[in-house]
Image (tube, grey):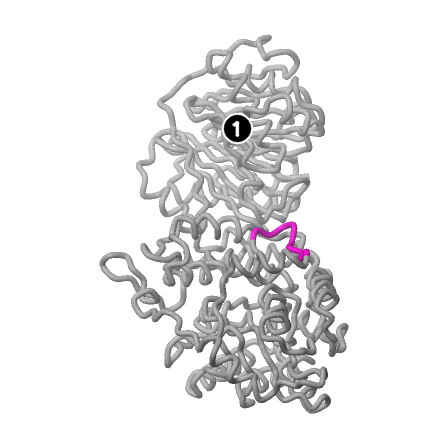
Amino acid sequence: MCGIFAIAAKPEAGLDGRGFRALVDRLFLLSETRGQEAAGLAVRTPKTIEIYKQAGRPSRMLKGPNYDAFWKDLADSDAAGTQVAVGHARLVTNGFQTLDANNQPVFAEGVAGVHNGIIVNNGDLRASHPDLPHRSDVDTEVLMGLVGRHRGTAQGDPKSGVARAFAEIEGAATVALLFDDADRLALATNTGTLYTARPAAGALLVAASERYILEEFLKSGPWKEKAAEVVQVPAGTGLDVDLASLDGNAFDLVGDGASRPVAATLGSRRDIVERIRTPDDLRRCTRCLLPSTFPMITFDADGVCSKCADYQKRTLLGREALEAAVAPHRRSNGRPDCIVAFSGGRDSSYGLHYVKEELGLNPVAFTYDWGMVTDIARRNQARLTGALGVEHAVRAADIPTKRRYIRKNLEAWLKAPKLGMIPLFMAGDKQFYYYARQLRKETGIDLVIFCAGNALEHTDFKTGFAGVRKEGGEKAILTDLPLSNKLQLAAYYGANYLANPRYLNASLFDSVWAFYESYLVPDDFLYLYRYIDWDERQIQQTLAQYNWEGAEDSATTWRIGDGTAAFYNYVYHTVAGFTENDTLRSNQIREGLIDRETALAMVQEENRPRFDAMQEYCQMVGVNFEEVLMTINGIPRLY
């Protein structure tokens, strides 16, 4: 299973911070053979135990700028005494590695450590110790918590805490542990999957999961000509290591560890610092929610963002103008008099209701199914059309081909991820403009109503990441973009196609067609939410009358009908720290519809990863879910 290691170097080893890091990095690379899905490290400093971890291969983590910054911060601290680190190369057994809380090292009850193995009675232990920390899904958290609790009842003795914890668990466990208030390193195993060596004339202690790892490690370094003996820690045994001397005292894991009593050497308490930057750490506008990673954003002296400073409240055309716009198209003979673009999502579902029940028109609902319409959306389409008695016209794409196009573009993107290229994943649905025009010709119905274009939901950051600063104010409709912006977008996409030839695949014509339909063909549709107010509460209350279905894994009703949304919002949130939800809630704040505190609480729930939806997306397009998420989590953060 996972690979764990520990290394402790006394000053006599002659290692500066750079030299110590080099040894840690080598242990990571050697341990990667045991786990490539996440990596993490805990380093003991004079005042803290610093924890760094991320999803993805250890070798990728070592090359990342955030990892470099972690070590730079350590170098800036006052180094003194023995340098100590414990590390982990993860093979996932429970808990998604894409959530940092599920990766190791794990901290609980004053213990920071790494664990290899599976504790099979994890659920029972959580139930019998409900007061232990529960921030993650991994069994390691229970083990750390038990060690800390039992150690607390044994006057701080690490070995007693470890032994008592091992007495409660069922399954396999090999651990390396650091303590926030004791100058000790604890190593223990109930399987024998742990080896140690003491090179550099005993000034260095190294432990790893396999003999081979340590033997390879010892082939390099100043001690290579006098390689130390590699010794297995027997199953059912622990080592209590004094970090000042690196003397280790063995103890049995049977009983409470008191068979070979050793007093704990207590030092000053160290703060546990988890160096995992999250969107909660972002600098956000003091008025709305937009963070400093939002493209082209600036802040004034009061911390108010340029988006707030430039914002102009919505001016709706109104119900009277809407009535005037639809009046020439009304038919009194009972025949359909308008087409309503209908995805089955929240806005179009309410729009269909409004057109039929409020305006009194006789619509035909139109859906373009390009392969990413969710089952929830299809069920909601059935609910609304059935209850309203509305004809439903569907145009279906060659779905296997469309999904193959997505796969090819996604695979190209993963080779050189750029946030500005993410809209390419959704290019396949843009032909709905074309088929709406075709349906107009086929039916002789001139009035086509779209329920997109709600100004509160505009997501201009998508083009912002492509380097396009929108001219002429905020535009919620693609065709409203000024020509200069359209040319900028075309140039950006063209440059990336040339830089990454993988984009020059079978989807090219489909993508060019999508750009043409989105930006170049004149748009004469009627956009409902330019006339009427978009009131989220009213919309949801109305849809409840139809038993409209939400997603079980989402706190929002927005975008749940779009199979790509969970995926691309995860990318934006992981790399830039915000999603479409932040933009919607920020606009609601500016309109005075909600307060900032409420909005912030909402996006914290709405931005939670929708792993089931993402996994379904990957299955539909034919890519490996875990591999894709590991790549995404290895992209350097913008924060």
Name which quarter of the figure residue 293 lies in: bottom left
Q: Can you see residue 185?
A: yes
Residue sitting nearer the eye, 251 or 138: 138
Q: Position of residue 443 (x, y in %)?
A: 72, 88
Extreme-front residue of the structure: 332
Spot occupied by residue 330 in the image (x, y as percentages of width and height): 62, 85
Residue nearest the viewer, comparing 343 with 340 = 340
Q: Amino acid at mark 1?
A: Leu
Q: Residue furthest left?
A: 301
How far from the left and from the top, in percent, is residue 305?
Answer: 32, 62
**The C terminus - image quarter:** bottom left
Dominant secondary structure, magenta: loop
Q: Is residue 252 above or below residue 522?
A: above
Residue 565 among those drawn in magenta: no
Residue found at x 64% / y 55%: 550
The residue tagged 1 is: 177
Q: Secondary structure at mark 1?
A: strand
Whether the magenta-drawn stretch holds residue 548 is answered as: yes
Could you tell me if residue 412 is visible in this image?
no
In the image, taking residue 52 as reference, residue 426 lies left or right, namely right
Where does the magenta region start and end?
Answer: 547-555
